[in-house]
Amino acid sequence: MWKQLLVTVGTGVLVLSGTSAVSADQITPQDLVKTTKSLQQTEQRLHTSQQAVAKAERRAEATEAKRDAIQKKIDYAHTQLASYETALNSETNDPSLFKQVLAAVLPIAKAEAAVSEKIETDLKMKKAATIRSLEKLENEQAEIEAEHKKARSSHSAAYKQLQGQATQLKDLKRQTAAMAPEKFMMPAIGRLSQGYGAASGQFGYTFHNGLDIAANIGTPIYVAAAGTVTDVKAGGPYGKHVFIEHEIDGQKWTTVYAHMHKIEVKKGQALLQGEGIGQIGNTGNSSGPHLHFEVHQGKYAYSSSSAGNTVNPMDVAEVLGGASPIKTTY
Ligand SMILES: [Zn+2]
């Protein structure tokens, strides 16, 4: 196909065929970036909600344990209270008159009565103290109960939110998957001015390793797939150019964007598919504003006389962004 392309380049007539651009026509790179970004945000929110649910669950469990401990204390206080009452009843069953009579008659009986009264006072005090601590425990129990309820309701609210986000995430994943090209997308909208393949050698190479997309200076360039900027350079035959590495289904790729007017990314920057990286220009060995776009399988390796590890972008990159991103005839 490229031979025919080269022949027709000279006459200004290009006819391209075999690209699968139909479904992606309505989707712009901006749409793709927006959906991918909200997908990432939802994933982040989902993670936060998961943590909130776990925290609320731990809190609910902790209040349950506290509640059980207080209940044990209350039960014990009730047992004590019952035993004090039994003791006091057995004391008061003995009529005080009898004690008085005994006290009047015998000094020993008087002493016994005093001891008996002391026991009674002691028991009454213990009973009162137990009632007070029981009241305190019951207040504490009510507080714990309220806290527990709150923890449970915040747990159920967080869980509900989590479920909502999970559904949202599923929808967004489906949406993004439907939008995103499987591998690469064409990085710019313009006119295909030179195809991939053997070249005459008049520009110093007998194999054109990339694809040339001609457009006005300043036309935006989008990254062809999600990846990381591995290098940004300003000179040489490529002029201002950017190298981006991608990992797609376990396979490493490198894309190159050359002759740029303006570079808008930095080395090490992570990018979503379709994010802007700069503008089309006319820097380096270039005879008119265009983007020279290369796709390498693995690391970047240049050959001026063979394909090397490059592939034809037309075979792997889908057209995205408007009705006719790469105009085919002139
Ligand atoms: Zn080129």
Image (cartoon, helix red, strand yellow):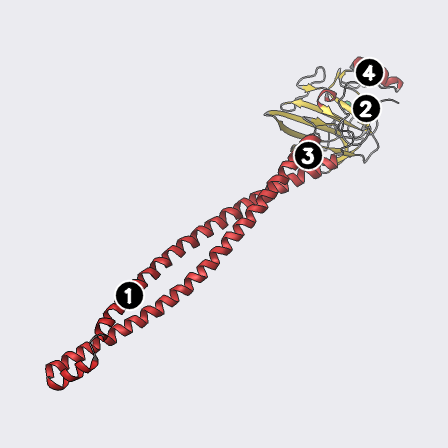
* Some atom of ligand 1 lies within 8 Å of the CB belonging to the residue at label 4: no
At label 3, which amino acid type do we have?
A: Gln
Q: CA distance from mark 4 to mark 2?
A: 11 Å
* Residue that badge 3 annotates: 175
Point out the tag, 1 or 4, that comes first from the N-terminus: 4
N-terminal label among 2 and 1? 1
In the image, what residue type sits under mark 4? Leu
Residue 82's mark? 1
Residue 223 occupies which quadrant of the picture?
Answer: top right
Q: Mark 4 highlights which residue?
A: 6
Q: Can residue 267 be seen in the rendering of this structure? A: no
- Secondary structure at badge 1 equals helix
Residue 38, labelled with which disc? none
**Residue occupying the point 39% across, 67% down:** 136
Asked whether disc 1 touches disc 4, contact meaning CB atoms under 8 Å apart, the reply is no
Q: Position of residue 209 (x, y in %)?
A: 73, 20
C-alpha separation, residue under disc 3 versus residue under disc 2 = 30 Å
Number of numbered discs visible in the structure rendering: 4
**Are dots 2 and 1 in contact, CB under 8 Å?**
no
Indicate which quadrant contains ligand 1. Answer: top right
Label 4 neighbourhood size at 10 Å, few (<14), some (14-19), many (20+)? many
- Lower position in the chain sequence, tag 3 or tag 1: 1
Do the CB atoms of the residues marked 4 and 2 lie less than 8 Å apart? Answer: no
